[in-house]
Image (cartoon, grey):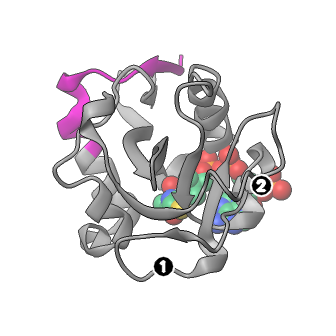
Amino acid sequence: MTEIIQTKPQHHAAIEQLLDQCFGPGRVARTAERLRERNRQIDAYARLYVDGAAQVRGSISYWPIRIGDTPALLLGPLAVHPDLQGQGVGIALMRESMAQIDMSRFKAILLVGDLPYYQRVGFAVAPEAVRMPGPVDAARLLVYTGEASPEINAEALAGAVRPAPDLC
Ligand SMILES: CC(C)(COP(=O)(O)OP(=O)(O)OC[C@H]1O[C@@H](n2cnc3c(N)ncnc32)[C@H](O)[C@@H]1OP(=O)(O)O)[C@@H](O)C(=O)NCCC(=O)NCCS
């Protein structure tokens, strides 16, 4: 039996192993990684996909950030074991975890990824005024602001993006 469960601190080593398998060693050099340094993930939103032997096969994490003064979340990494890719696990992990997020507290979810994939769950290209702490392809900087407000509020989503561990 496979299932989606909430991430606990004891899972972190298995998640690191999965991320190495999915992304390779270059992953810590990415710009999004700068927002995870000196930050801590919000385990209440993080989810795992585990198989019948309790092995971690998929993972999604969230990190508190500010976009200018606006409280928000960084989504990622999202990773699914190569043997299970293309079976809906990634979308299921996003739907399950995003349903837990209080969008009145965190006004947006930000990520760096492929629009054709993430638009399936409501992401759109972020406003130009959102500034990441390093180089990012603007077409891959995506944001979700919730079902109730599909139009991205360009005024609220402007400024430098930085870690916000105080929001945990
Ligand atoms: C990207 C990833 C998380 C997707 O998870 P998954 O469980 O394989 O995806 P799902 O099964 O939920 O969705 C599959 C669908 O999305 C599409 N898809 C997958 N990755 C895509 C991408 N990068 N761009 C566009 N579409 C994509 C598939 O073609 C498939 O389409 P279909 O439903 O029309 O057949 C997974 O492939 C992975 O871990 N990749 C390596 C790490 C990575 O790149 N993570 C994302 C960082 S941005």
Q: Quadrant of residue 29?
A: bottom left
- Image x and y of residue 5, in percent: 45, 18
- At numbered mark 1, what does the secondary structure look like: helix, strand or loop? loop
Residue 154 visible (yes or no) = yes
> Regarding ligand 1, which quadrant of the image does it lie in?
bottom right
Q: Is residue 34 above or below residue 61?
A: below
Q: Is residue 6 above or below residue 28?
A: above
**Which amino acid is tagged 2?**
Gln
Quarter of the rendering containing residue 132: bottom left
- How would you rate the neighbour count of disc 1 (Cα within 10 Å): few for under 14, some for 14-19, many for 20 or more? some
User: Residue 127 vs residue 112: left or right?
Assistant: right
Q: Which residue is pictured at 30% across the width and 27% down the height?
A: 168
Q: In the image, which residues are magenta? A: 1-15
- Residue 121, quarter of the rendered image: top right
Name the residue tied to disc 1.
136
At 33% across and 49% down in the image, what residue appears?
Answer: 18
- Residue 122 locus on image (x, y percent): 77, 46
Q: Badge 2 is on which residue?
A: 119
Q: Quick one: label 1 or label 2, which is nearer the N terminus?
A: 2
Q: Which mark is residue 113?
A: none
* Residue sitting at x 73%, y 35%: 146
The location of residue 50, given as percent across then percent down, is 44, 26
Does residue 9 belong to the magenta stretch?
A: yes
Q: Nearer the viewer, residue 145 or 9?
A: 145
Label 2 Cα crowd, 10 Å radius (few <14 / some 14-19 / many 20+): some
Q: CA distance from mark 1 to mark 2?
A: 18 Å
Residue 27, position as x, y percentages in the image: 31, 68
- Side of 8 relative to 60 (left or right): left
In the rendered structure, which amino acid carries the disc numbered 1?
Answer: Val
